Image: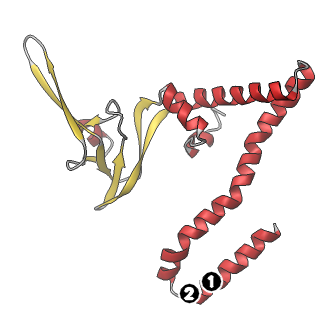
Amino acid sequence: MRDFSLWFRVLYIIFWFCKMKRIFKAAFAPAVAIASFSLLLPVLVQAQSAAVVACVKSMTSTLGVSPDVAFGECNKRTLVECIKLVSENNFVATSIRREGSGYLIDLGSDSTRWLEGGAWKSHGCKPYIPGPQRITQTISSWNTNKHQWFRQAVCPQDVVELDQPYDVSEAKILCETDSVPQRLKDNPKTL
């Protein structure tokens, strides 16, 4: 706690030396965000590991297995629960930058996620023509349909939730790299 108050005093002094709000925002806002995250990270890790510690204690006392075996099993259970949680939710695309009066949303390189122009418009977005796109054709005995798929769009909001769930491999990567979107962690009904 003492380190935190010292850090805060240093920031306070820097702020008053800068005097110009624009300079402070441009030069120190990213540093403040990174420093704040680094101060909160141990608390988040401690909360996550508390569940694993409780699991290990339970397994060693009830099943009589060694702490090493219990730890490995509890980590697997935590990973499986995380994958299940993520794969039950829809994919959320986030903006990669500001574009004009909106945000440029990118769905990633998996072309099965890309949306047609009408689907983008249903989300209130406008397909980004200079971005990656692909064209498919479906041919039947009486008709030929052309579909144009867009990877990117400009949207008024900085996130778009699709009607497509995360697949298991995506969920596994998100859980293993501890990159689960915060909105899924904050959802009390699934935790």
> Left of 110 or right of it: where is 142?
left
* Residue 161, quarter of the rendered image: top left
Q: Secondary structure at mark 2?
A: helix
Identify the residue shown where x is 83% and y is 33%: 54
Name the quadrant of the N terminus. Answer: bottom right
> Left of 166 or right of it: where is 67?
right
Judge whether 171 appears above or below 13 on screen: above
User: In the rendered image, which residue does mark 2 sit on?
Assistant: 18
Judge whether 39 appears above or below 174 on screen: below
Judge whether 117 appears above or below 27 on screen: above
Marks 2 and 1, how far apart at CA: 6 Å
* Residue 75, quarter of the rendered image: top right
Amino acid carrying mark 2 in the image: Cys
**How many numbered marks does the figure carry?**
2
Name the quadrant of the C terminus. Answer: top right
Horizontal and vertical percent for residue 107?
Answer: 36, 41
User: In the rendered image, which residue does mark 1 sit on?
Assistant: 14
Identify the residue shown where x is 28% and y is 62%: 100
> Left of 6 or right of it: where is 13?
left
Identify the residue shown where x is 69% and y is 80%: 10
Q: Secondary structure at mark 1?
A: helix
Amino acid carrying mark 1 in the image: Ile
Crowd band around label 2 with a 10 angstrom C-alpha radius: few (<14), some (14–19), many (20+):
few
